Image (cartoon, helix red, strand yellow):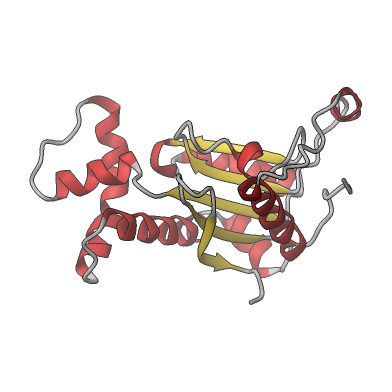
């Protein structure tokens, strides 16, 4: 497989989609997973994309996009909520490692979004720090509900859109890189049963 470290945002995005298509078809190449790749990467890493996804165990990024060692800089939190640690990690992938693409990856039937939806309807708020995750998801649920949405997966898509916009608005680093055309931020929704991804938001992709 070619080295994608210096790809444009559009090329990096296309490479991810091609990998996902292979995964869905069951024709994965499983690139960059051998001893030679391991040795090659020991001195440095140059991932071609930052993957900011939900922590759900079914969203293993390198598997569903058919990639290998050193290809993706992965940051994951429940419900892909973005606190300072997550934002700093994403900025590191873009500014220091020069990744030209950030992908926000949500998925259908997301537990964090479902919990926020149930709490919004009057259910008990989860205790501990789980409640903090739900609180961070709640604005997306409220915005989706205000626009007439009623289904959890509609709330998921709204949460992905708001996460994409929030990353660019909250991070001067990302805002500068997107404005300069050096990076794009794309929001994808993953379907657990089918293994497919659907684009729901994009900033700086040029289409």
The residue under the point 31% across, 47% down is: 137
Q: Residue furthest bottom?
A: 207
* Occupied quadrant, residue 17: bottom right
**Residue closest to the eye, 71 or 177:** 71
The residue under the point 45% across, 57% down is: 166
Q: Residue furthest front?
A: 26
- Whether residue 81 is visible to the viewer of this picture, yes or no, is no
- Whether residue 68 is visible to the viewer of this picture, yes or no, is yes
Q: Return the x and y of residue 71 as percentages of the image width and height.
A: 75, 41
- Is 31 left or right of 13, judged from the image as shown? right
- Is 24 left or right of 150, judged from the image as shown? right
Using the image, determine if residue 204 lies above or below residue 119.
below
The quarter in which the N terminus is drawn is: top right
**Residue closest to the eye, 77 or 27:** 27
Using the image, determine if residue 72 lies above or below residue 196.
above
The residue under the point 66% across, 41% down is: 92
- Is 154 left or right of 86, judged from the image as shown? left
The residue under the point 45% across, 36% down is: 77
Q: Return the x and y of residue 163 as percentages of the image width and height.
A: 44, 55
Q: Return the x and y of residue 96 as percentages of the image width and height.
A: 74, 43
The quarter in which the C terminus is drawn is: bottom right
**Residue closest to the eye, 47 or 118:** 118
Q: Return the x and y of residue 205 as percentages of the image width and height.
A: 65, 69
- Is 115 left or right of 156, judged from the image as shown? left
Using the image, determine if residue 166 lies above or below residue 130.
below
Using the image, determine if residue 38 lies above or below residue 110.
above
* Occupied quadrant, residue 119: top left
């Amino acid at each position: 497989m070619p080295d994608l470290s210096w790809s444009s945002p559009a090329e990096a995005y296309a490479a991810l989609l091609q990998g996902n298509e292979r995964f869905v078809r069951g024709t994965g190449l499983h690139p960059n997973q051998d001893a030679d790749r391991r040795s090659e990467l020991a001195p440095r890493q140059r991932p071609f994309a930052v993957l900011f996804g939900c922590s759900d165990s079914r969203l293993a990024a390198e598997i569903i996009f058919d990639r290998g060692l050193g290809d993706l800089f992965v940051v994951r939190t429940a419900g892909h909520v973005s606190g300072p640690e997550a934002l700093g990690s994403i900025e590191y992938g873009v500014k220091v490692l020069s990744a030209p693409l950030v992908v926000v990856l949500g998925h259908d039937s997301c537990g964090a979004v479902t919990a926020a939806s149930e709490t919004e309807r009057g259910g008990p708020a989860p205790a501990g720090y789980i409640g903090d995750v739900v609180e961070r998801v709640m604005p997306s649920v409220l915005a989706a509900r205000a626009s007439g949405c009623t289904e959890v997966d509609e709330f998921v898509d709204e949460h992905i859109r708001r996460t994409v916009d929030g990353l660019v608005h909250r991070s001067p680093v990302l805002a500068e890189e997107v404005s300069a055309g050096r990076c794009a931020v794309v929001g994808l929704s993953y379907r657990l049963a089918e293994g497919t991804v659907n684009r729901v938001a994009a900033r700086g992709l040029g289409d």
